[in-house]
């Protein structure tokens, strides 16, 4: 009897160890994925509903993603730019909800499979509700690639079928460079059509834009209808390096950094300035208009010691916004 009890106890220990080992293997992989659950919320038919998932290799060895699978064709995973991640590397991919071929409540999952440094997988629950009474055409505001200063405009048709008195009360946009206007096109027989015109300001700085427009309706149950927007404002003038890192200096010490400033067209540099560190930066500014300027900027360390992060402003003729170049460095105290 005691021998049987001993074997039973040993069996329990083995099972527990195996379960702990399996949990540990799964745990290392789950810590690499930045998303534990995806909820698209309530979206319109035809809308582009996309979320991004990032896998970041925080381990000390290479990680290989063998596959990304979905439990339903109602979601589609984008192609990974790389499957092999060295320590410190990351990869981001899109997960799209198919709002054209599917409708109503969707509950499914996405699984990321690993086969190195050991086999494991991470399953992410995915949910969303595709409402059929609201349809967007096109399904996303795509500005595309826009030259700096040009601005852009996109019109989306919003079609509703249901109540004859249905209304869009407001349009909310989180991005300061994007505005929208709404025009009612028709209202009859339970059908309501709007034209939503979305504008990108010509003053928008060079950047990638990815945000949401939210239509606020008078629906009591689901008043909010999201619409994605994306685009890229292409810089007319670029600066390299994008961030200047100055070596540690003592007060009064001087160093020189080089900026390569390139434009699509010839331009004139008026001056450089850093209001927060007045007198610390200086440069011999060329007088003529060129497409390429190589600027040698002198920096004299101030008396104030410690680390600093400031913005160096390069002012260009006939350009309202100056170029902003982050500058980082450290001024050491003298013993």
Image (cartoon, helix red, strand yellow):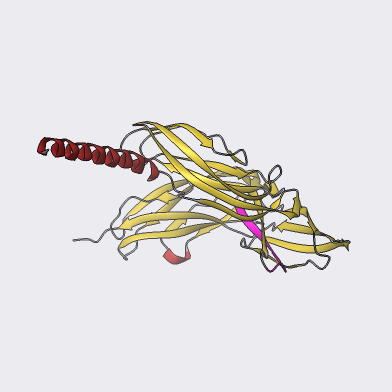
Q: Residue at x 25, y 41 (%)?
A: 16
Q: Residue at x 76, y 63 (%)?
A: 181
Q: Nearer the viewer, residue 281 or 166?
A: 166
331 on left or right of 189: left
Q: Residue at x 57, y 37 (%)?
A: 78
Q: Quadrant of the C terminus?
A: bottom left
Residue most extreme to the front: 1
- Is 219 one of the magenta-colored residues? yes
Give the image location of residue 1, x and y in percent. 12, 38
Against 255, residue 302 (above or below) is below
Residue 171 seen in the figure: yes
Q: Quadrant of residue 195?
A: bottom right
Principal secondary structure, stretch drawn in magenta: strand
Q: Nearer the viewer, residue 29 or 11?
A: 11
Residue segment shown in magenta: 206-220
34 on left or right of 175: left
Against 181, residue 205 (above or below) is above
Residue 278 seen in the figure: no
Against 22, residue 278 (above or below) is below
Give the image location of residue 152, x and y in percent. 73, 52
Q: Nearer the viewer, residue 99 or 136?
A: 99
């Amino acid at each position: 009897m005691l021998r049987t009890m001993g074997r039973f106890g040993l069996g329990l220990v083995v099972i527990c160890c195996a379960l702990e080992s399996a949990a540990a293997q799964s745990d290392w992989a789950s810590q690499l994925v930045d998303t534990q659950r995806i909820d698209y919320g309530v979206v319109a038919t035809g809308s582009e509903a996309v979320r991004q998932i990032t896998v970041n290799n925080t381990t000390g060895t290479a990680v290989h993603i063998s596959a990304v699978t979905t439990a339903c064709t109602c979601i589609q995973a984008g192609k990974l730019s790389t499957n092999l991640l060295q320590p410190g590397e990351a990869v981001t991919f899109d997960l799209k909800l198919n709002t054209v071929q599917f409708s109503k409540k969707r509950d499914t999952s996405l699984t990321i499979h690993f086969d190195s440094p050991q086999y494991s997988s991470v399953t992410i629950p995915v949910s969303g509700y595709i409402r059929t009474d609201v349809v967007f055409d096109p399904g996303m505001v795509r500005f595309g690639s826009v030259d700096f200063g040009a601005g852009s405009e996109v019109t989306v048709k919003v079609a509703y079928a249901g109540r004859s008195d249905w209304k869009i009360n407001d349009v909310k946009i989180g991005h300061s460079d994007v505005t929208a206007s709404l025009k009612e096109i028709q209202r009859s027989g339970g059908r309501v059509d709007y034209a939503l015109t979305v504008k990108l300001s010509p003053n928008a700085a060079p950047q990638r834009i990815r945000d949401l427009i939210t239509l606020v309706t008078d629906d009591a149950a689901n008043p909010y209808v999201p619409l994605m927007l994306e685009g890229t404002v292409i810089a007319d003038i670029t600066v390299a390096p994008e961030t200047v890192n100055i070596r540690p200096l003592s007060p009064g010490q001087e160093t020189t950094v080089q900026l390569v400033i390139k434009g699509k067209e010839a331009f004139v540099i008026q001056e450089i300035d850093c209001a927060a560190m007045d007198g610390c930066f200086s440069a011999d500014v060329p007088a003529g208009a060129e497409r390429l300027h190589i600027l040698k900027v002198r920096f004299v360390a101030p008396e104030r010691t410690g680390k600093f992060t400031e913005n160096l402003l390069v002012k260009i003729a006939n350009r309202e916004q100056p170029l902003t170049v982050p500058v980082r460095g450290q001024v050491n105290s003298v013993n």
